[in-house]
Amino acid sequence: MGKNHPNVDKYVESRARALESLLLEKGILPADAVDRVIQRYEADTGPLVGARAVARAWRDPDYKRRLLGDSRAALAELGVEFDMLRVVENTPAVHNMVVCTLCSCYPWVVMGLPPTWYKMPAYRSRAVSEPRAILREMGLAVPAERERRAPSIWTRPGSCR
């Protein structure tokens, strides 16, 4: 726990370890359960999955077309079952900025756990009201002539990610 998250409160860390110990001791949790979850998030879920899809799209134009046209099928080729993701492309003419105002539809399976700042109300509201300013603060200046899109793909919470 501490090696990957050096700023975790010691009290929280000790409580998590105590809870894990109790669950193991009472037979509620199999001995390898925590390790399997960690392995899943380190190798089978998260940013590595998204990076594999992007890298493949960079080197394989046919895959890129499939990823942009039918992301579900294209991700399935990489062993990912995620049917509520729409892939969009930034171009010299268009910059997409996706923000979830509810934070329930972040695509963890493909991108990993969301950063803390992404879930903060201040970020979410500013991303909607002043997206160019917040992108500039993050080190990305989007030229005024480039169209900025916030894809309006949500018809209800969780309908698309």
Image: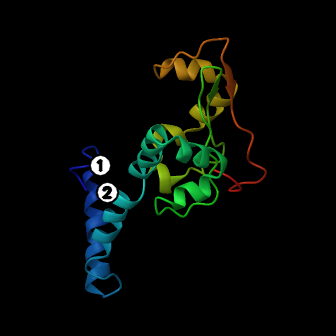
* 113 up-or-down from 128: above or below: below
Label 1 Cα neighbours within 10 Å, binned few <14 / some 14-19 / many ≥20: few
* 118 vs 7, nearest the viewer: 118
Residue 128: give x, y in percent of width and height: 68, 30
Q: Do the residues labelled 1 and 2 touch (CB within 8 Å)?
A: yes
Label 2 Cα neighbours within 10 Å, binned few <14 / some 14-19 / many ≥20: few
The answer to whether residue 113 is visible is no
* 151 vs 54, nearest the viewer: 54
CA–CA distance between discs 1 and 2? 7 Å
Residue at (24% x, 45% y) in the render? 6
Q: Name the residue under label 1.
A: 8
Q: Quadrant location of residue 125?
A: top right
* 93 up-or-down from 89: above or below: above
Give the secondary structure at mark 2. Answer: helix
Q: Name the residue under label 2.
A: 12
Q: Residue furthest right?
A: 155
Residue at (29% x, 49% y) in the render? 9
Q: Quadrant location of residue 88?
A: top right
Residue 82: give x, y in percent of width and height: 57, 60
| Amino acid on which disc 1 is placed | Val
